[in-house]
């Protein structure tokens, strides 16, 4: 009882400020015995005694203090005996630890802010480039047929474009921001290539389905004819109406490029590598090609994709050549991702806007969202196919391509439902084969 009373008196004297250092020493001894955590400065000024610690007890507190002291000695902030280099009083271990943690938090916060700022600046830069060049895209007014919505196919999943390559008889550009001649004049242009581009809803896949230029289809208001006649007779509205009725797919957008723009775009890309599977002799409308890889500039590429008369299957082989070339273009454009190198983006967008025209429903916001949505698309995510063909037939003196009704209907159904993987599994040989390197 006498010992406990003397200890209590010592603590009381220390906290009351009467005995100075003696009271503080006694208080510290008693705090160690009871597991109390008492700040050095609280003893120094005699102001208070902390409440009992609840963070792990005496043994863990002694281990942590030993670790902190060792860390300080190793870092050069203090010495093993608790005195600093200047001979002054060393701050308590808890205070040193709080300061160290505060410095680490400050450094990490600064690094995080800097990293986020760099990402934000890069994203804003890419966004500005896309928005800037979207305003330069040539827009086609009144590209869609004037048909009530109720009479058009219902909207499916994903996004669908009609793409056309124009056989223009004008010596001046007809597509792109530098177009000097009209995109369409009745009887003056035919769609030399007609394709349906389907972008999956998740933007992870793209499917390009060619409709052979000689495909025999119903043209609204004109009767049966080759599909390329629809553009010649009625421009984009009649071609879109024809494709929608053929496929029962709602067309969302339209894009066109003439052959002059095709050459300029190819040259702007620095040419492309195209693999020719076998030796091909010269023909009436084409040059000879040796088997192997060819680096083609714009003029050579145009000659390659337009040849038809010397090919064994005529229009179908021509479509495959177009697919081979377009695959090479997409692989070059998307090899590292569309937006992976912002430094290349201005040249790419400048070439595209200089060569291509799109419908006026495709706003700048739509274009920006489209490019951003396709930023992770790669060349091998783009699949090429041809509308299924059942036979060739001579109709009124014209060599026509007849589409296979059942397989075509299944193709259009899966495009509409955004389930092209089902079609590919059902018809595994429908995709245009890759050429061997």
Image (cartoon, rainbow, N blue to C red):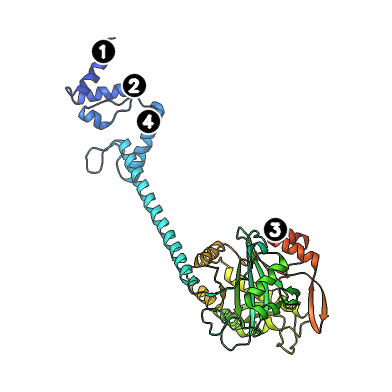
Q: Is residue 42 left or right of residue 373?
A: left
* Residue shown at 24% from the left, 25% from the top: 25
Q: Position of residue 401 (x, y in %)?
A: 78, 76
Quarter-of-image position of residue 262: bottom right
Q: Which residue is mark 3?
A: 419
The circle on residue 62 is 4
- State the residue in front, 142 or 317: 142
* Marker disc for residue 5: 1
Circle 3/circle 4 CB separation < 8 Å: no
Task: Give coordinates of residue 106: x percent, y percent.
Answer: 35, 48
Dot 1 or dot 4: first in sequence order is: 1
**Residue drawn at the location 30% of the way across and 40% of the way down:** 79
State the residue lying farthest toward the left: 18
Residue sticking out furthest to the top: 1
Q: CA distance from mark 3 to mark 4?
A: 66 Å
How far from the left and from the top, in percent, is residue 362?
55, 68
SS for callout 3: loop
Q: CA distance from mark 2 to mark 3?
A: 75 Å
């Amino acid at each position: 009882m006498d010992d406990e009373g003397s200890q209590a008196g010592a603590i009381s004297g220390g906290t009351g400020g009467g005995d100075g250092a003696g009271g503080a020493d006694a208080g510290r001894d008693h705090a160690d015995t009871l597991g109390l955590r008492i700040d050095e400065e609280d003893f120094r000024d005699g102001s208070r005694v902390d409440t009992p610690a609840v963070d792990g007890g005496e043994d863990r507190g002694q281990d942590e203090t030993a670790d902190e002291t060792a860390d300080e000695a190793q870092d050069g902030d203090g010495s093993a005996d608790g005195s600093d280099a200047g001979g002054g009083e060393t701050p308590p271990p808890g205070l040193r630890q709080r300061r160290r943690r505060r410095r680490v938090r400050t450094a990490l916060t600064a690094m995080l802010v800097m990293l986020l700022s760099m990402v934000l600046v890069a994203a804003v830069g890419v966004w500005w480039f896309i928005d800037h060049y979207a305003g330069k895209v040539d827009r086609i007014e009144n590209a869609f047929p004037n048909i009530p919505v109720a009479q058009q196919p219902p909207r499916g999943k994903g996004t669908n474009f009609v793409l056309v390559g124009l056989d223009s008889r004008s010596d001046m550009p007809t597509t792109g921001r530098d177009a000097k001649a009209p995109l369409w004049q009745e009887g003056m242009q035919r769609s030399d290539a007609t394709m349906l581009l389907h972008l999956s809803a998740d933007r992870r896949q793209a499917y390009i389905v060619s409709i052979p230029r000689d495909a025999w289809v119903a043209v609204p208001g004109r009767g049966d004819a080759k599909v390329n006649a629809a553009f010649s007779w009625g421009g984009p509205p009649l071609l879109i109406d024809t494709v929608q009725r053929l496929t029962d797919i709602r067309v969302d957008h339209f894009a066109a490029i003439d052959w002059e723009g095709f050459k300029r775009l190819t040259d702007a890309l620095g040419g492309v590598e195209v693999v020719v599977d076998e030796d091909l002799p010269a023909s009436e409308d084409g040059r000879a090609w040796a088997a192997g890889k060819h680096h083609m500039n714009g003029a050579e590429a145009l000659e390659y994709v337009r040849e038809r008369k010397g090919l064994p299957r005529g229009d179908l082989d021509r479509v495959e050549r177009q697919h081979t070339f377009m695959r090479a273009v997409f692989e070059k454009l998307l090899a590292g991702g569309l937006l992976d190198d912002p430094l290349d983006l201005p040249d790419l967008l400048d070439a595209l806007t200089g060569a291509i025209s799109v419908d006026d429903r495709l706003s700048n916001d739509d274009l920006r969202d489209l490019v951003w949505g396709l930023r992770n698309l790669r060349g091998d995510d783009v699949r090429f196919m041809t509308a299924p063909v059942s036979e060739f037939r001579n109709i009124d003196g014209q060599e026509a391509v007849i589409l296979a009704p059942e397989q075509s209907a299944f193709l259009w159904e899966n495009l509409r439902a955004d389930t092209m993987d089902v079609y590919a599994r059902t018809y595994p040989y429908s995709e245009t084969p890759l050429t061997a390197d």
